[in-house]
Image: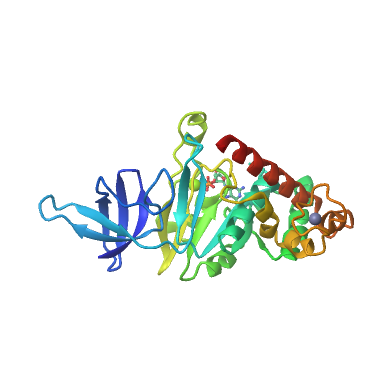
């Protein structure tokens, strides 16, 4: 039977069959992996073929169907391996906050690059707008100025006061939506505001005393309402952009991509090359400085990862 993987703990997988049955499955010892070196052979969101073993009566995953897409991060422990966060994603919501905690624009831009590379449409959700102080409002306005002009939808919401929740819900209709963002930004609170029956745990303090030890970052998929799924990803502190070459990077910054055709060199990395249309656009204020800074930081990051892999 065909099924969708809702949760993975490493040795057991919770799946939902196409007929709607919820089951726990395991993976046979020798499992044919796709051609990616990852720490997890099966990821949340995977479509799989499951059979029941006649003797043990256990449900066993026989086959994984081709992934439409997947997003990976560098495995926190084995840096040369990838960890697949989730697969078969239709769209993503990156949840950020201006304060409590503050999400850096660097983190946001990293995720936008990853989503762009995997062709996943993203909406930026700014949560906790109920607690914006005047100095936070300046940053809020800056985000609202920069990102929609690049082509990203930005929604300001308050899970606490149930503001803007309808706008989020309407994006999820019959989709599999990835929710990403730092711990504490209110991802679970937003899910609960949409569907209180799911009753996800909020304000997980355990993240605090897990610090430094092995923090699990297993994602979980929930049916948030009929035929609409969300993938909640706990505990993501840092994103590394991998599987992207330095020359490809500017292609994943929509506005940088648009200007780069005007550069003198067609392999321009927009650092110190002469007659760079991208640097010109930054000086003219047509590309925001913070986006350009993110670009340079990610570029350096990609190069250093490559260095250590050699
Ligand atoms: N003031 C305010 N607090 C919120 C809002 N949404 C969530 N919180 C609080 O932020 C903390 C973390 O929320 P949680 O949903 O667990 O965040 P997650 O780690 O991203 O899932 C909890 O104490 C929530 O009550 C909001 O819109 N406004
Ligand atoms: Mg949560
Ligand atoms: Zn250039």
**Front in this rendered view, residue 107 or 62:** 62
Q: Position of residue 200 (x, y in %)?
A: 43, 50
Q: How many marks?
A: 0
**Front in this rendered view, residue 224 or 294:** 294
Whether residue 193 is visible, yes or no, is no
Q: Position of residue 183 (x, y in %)?
A: 55, 43
- The correct choice, above or below, for 167 with respect to 129 in the image is below
Quadrant field for ligand 3: bottom right
* Residue 270 placement, left or right of 128: right
At x 78%, y 64%, the residue is 261
The C terminus, quarter of image: top right
* The image quarter in which residue 229 lies: bottom left
Whether residue 45 is visible, yes or no, is yes
At x 30%, y 43%, the residue is 11
Q: Position of residue 125 (x, y in %)?
A: 62, 57
**Front in this rendered view, residue 206 or 51:** 51
At x 65%, y 42%, the residue is 303
The N terminus, quarter of image: bottom left
* Residue 38 placement, left or right of 160: left
Give the image's coloring scheme: rainbow
- The correct choice, above or below, for 187 with respect to 91 in the image is above
At x 57%, y 40%, the residue is 237
Q: Residue furthest left?
A: 55
Q: Residue furthest right?
A: 284
Q: Position of residue 174 (x, y in %)?
A: 46, 71
């Amino acid at each position: 039977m065909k099924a969708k993987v809702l949760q993975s703990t490493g040795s057991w997988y919770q799946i939902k069959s196409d007929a709607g049955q919820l089951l726990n499955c395991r993976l046979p010892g020798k499992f044919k992996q796709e051609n990616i070196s990852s720490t997890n052979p099966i990821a949340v969101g995977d479509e799989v073929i499951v059979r029941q073993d006649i003797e043990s009566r256990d449900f066993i995953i026989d086959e994984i169907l081709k992934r439409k897409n997947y997003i990976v991060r560098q495995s926190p422990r084995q840096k040369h391996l990838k960890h697949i966060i989730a697969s078969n994603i239709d769209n993503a919501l990156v949840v950020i906050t201006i304060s409590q905690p503050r999400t850096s624009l660097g983190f946001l831009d990293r995720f936008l690059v990853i989503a762009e590379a995997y062709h996943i449409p993203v909406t930026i959700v700014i949560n906790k707008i109920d607690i914006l102080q005047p100095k936070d409002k300046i940053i809020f306005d800056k985000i609202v100025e920069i990102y929609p002009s690049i082509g990203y939808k930005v929604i300001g919401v308050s899970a606490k006061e149930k503001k803007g929740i309808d706008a989020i819900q309407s994006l999820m209709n019959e989709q599999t939506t990835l929710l990403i963002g730092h711990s504490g930004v209110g991802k679970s609170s937003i899910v609960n505001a949409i569907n209180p029956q799911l009753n996800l745990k909020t304000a997980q303090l355990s993240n605090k005393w897990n610090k430094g030890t092995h923090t699990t970052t297993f994602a979980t998929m929930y049916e948030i309402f009929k035929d609409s799924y969300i993938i909640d990803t706990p505990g993501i502190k840092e994103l590394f952009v991998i599987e992207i070459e330095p020359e490809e990077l500017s292609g994943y910054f929509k506005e940088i991509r648009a200007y780069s055709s005007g550069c003198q060199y067609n392999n321009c990395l927009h650092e110190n090359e002469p007659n760079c249309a991208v640097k010109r656009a930054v000086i003219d204020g047509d590309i925001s400085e913070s986006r350009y800074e993110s670009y340079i930081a990610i570029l350096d990051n990609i190069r250093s990862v490559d260095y250590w892999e050699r």
